[in-house]
Amino acid sequence: MECQVAAAGQGSVEAEELLAFFRCRRLPYLDRVGPQEAKLPPDNLLEQWRRDRQALAATVFEQFPGERIGPGNEALLAAMAGGAERIYGGQIAAELVWESEEDAQFYSVWVSSSLDLLIRDPTLVGRSRRAAQSSYLPVHIRIGKRPKPEYELVLALQAELLGSLQGNVPKQGILILKDGKWHPVHLSRRRAQVRQLLQEYLHSLSQPEPPQVFMARSRCHLCHWREHCRQLNATAQPLSLLPGVTGSRYPLLQEAGIDSIEALANAQLDRLQAIPKLGSGVALQLQLQARATLSRQPLWIQSPPQTLPTTPVELYFDIEADPRHNVAYLLGLLVVEQAEGKKVANYHSCLAAEPREERQAWEQFLQLAQRYPDAPIYHFHGFEVQTCRRLGEQYRTDPRQVRLLLQRFVDLHAWVQRSVVLPIESYSLKNIARWLGFQWRLPDANGAQSIYWYSQWLETRERRYLEHSLIYNEDDCRATHRLKDWLSQSGVLHNSFGQNELTKVACPQP
Ligand code: SF4
């Protein structure tokens, strides 16, 4: 792959590219010259957010009507010259030229940006008619809950472009967020950052290969290049995919000459623990992870061994929530009972088919959990605990009842973290349970899909979307059950680990 689309110091850039560059140094490079056949279709949730943003923009337009314009500077200049109070849509393009203090190089970049809205600068009211008519502030509409640096960067970039057209660079911009409120943003501190980013982006485009970056769950999980990047990393730098090897730890390992999983697994622990800024606990954890990955076997780290309690009734709990509508819409519970030497598992769904029914779903869940007062409630990670606390406070549930409920919770993620190192790429429920051989009935389902399904259900009233959520939630509960069974059985089998000694146990063949 070769880019070199820009000589260093020159180029043409769209605002969205710069935004993508801010999020990930590799993303806009791949968008320009990456293998398009490897690009995944846009994620459903991203599409949903795009539609939400359009809907929010339409609402703003209804409340504050103005002049709609087409693309191009001419249309924009005409609307500005006409003194329109508000100008919606359109696109602005201008050449930005500056000399960098850093490398004493001249930069000249053609930058274009789609505009949501421009408003006449209210601070110029009372000044000369000409000044007031030709001075506008950029307004950016996003569905986020809080102002984010990247939103402010877009505003700062648009302000720079406006400066080229109207002769003064606005010092302020406005963000309209999900709550519909107008948030003023001071742009002075972002101006230098915009230029710095542009410089870095042009430099990146002048290179023959895309920048190497770390895959991070929060950044990559909805990206259309995630499979491509994962495969590249798996071949070129598999060490970077090892759990625990983060963007800051990877260079530390490399500097110490640890550039492969094998090198990490076989290094003297003393040598690893002496790596500056790594920390001795982290060094041990990384080495265990490398050894588990190479041997494809779990390594038990807990000493002395503990087993999870086995009781006549066990509950497995998982919540689906939709942050767009601010609702925990499905509280799923798998009730597993031992009867005559057999296990019987029944799934119950406490569903808020409408966001306003959340209280009902919560109370239904409480009653169900109360039916088995001695049963432990297994879940994976902290979300269920946080959500139950929030629901208890919001619906004024007796605090004692909530406290007793939470005392029964057993977090299997925490249990895994302190007990065992697994030969997997990440410690999500999906990865662990799949490694154990568990299969989800909807193979591509994930948390983002579940949010999308609920939104689609509310929009279209097509029952199949709710059905998907129910299947997905039930499978999550069943996967948690599978994990608990494996941990209990392995807990009986496993040897202890201590004194830097590694031990292996047989695991069910995935
Ligand atoms: S998958 Fe991650 S690293 Fe790759 S381009 Fe997308 S955001 Fe960047």
Image (tube, rainbow, N blue to C red):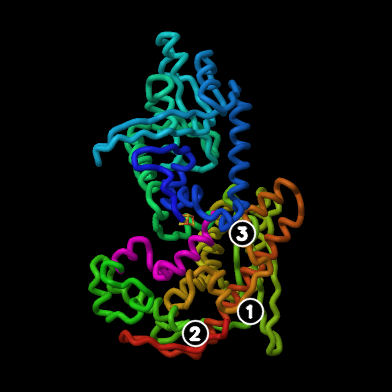
What distance separates the C-alpha of mark 2 from that of mark 1? 17 Å
Give the residue number, with chain letter if any, for mark 2. 307
Determine which of the numbered discs, if any, sits on residue 205 in the image.
none
Residue 326 pos. (x, y %): 58, 49
Residue visible at 52% across and 31% down? 115
Q: Which of the 4 image quadrants contains residue 262?
A: bottom left
Mark 1 residue type: Val
Q: Given this view, does label 3 or label 1 mark the residue nearer the observer?
A: 3
The residue closer to the viewer here, 168 or 10, is: 10
Which label's residue is closer to the chain start, 3 or 1?
1
Query: Is 271 situated above or below 326?
Result: below
Mark 3 residue type: Glu
236 falls in the magenta region: yes
The residue closer to the viewer here, 195 or 64, is: 195
Give the residue number, with chain letter if any, for mark 1. 313
Q: Is residue 424 left or right of residue 322?
A: left
Question: Is the stretch drawn in magenta largely helix, strand or loop?
Answer: helix
Few, some or many residues within 10 Å of mark 2 (<14, 14–19, 20+):
few
What span is in magenta? 224-253
Few, some or many residues within 10 Å of mark 1 (<14, 14–19, 20+):
some
What distance separates the C-alpha of mark 2 from that of mark 3? 29 Å
Q: Quadrant of the C terminus?
A: bottom right
- Circles 2 and 1: CB distance less than 8 Å? no
Which label's residue is closer to the chain start, 2 or 3?
2
Give the residue number, with chain letter if any, for mark 3. 320
What distance separates the C-alpha of mark 3 from that of mark 1? 23 Å
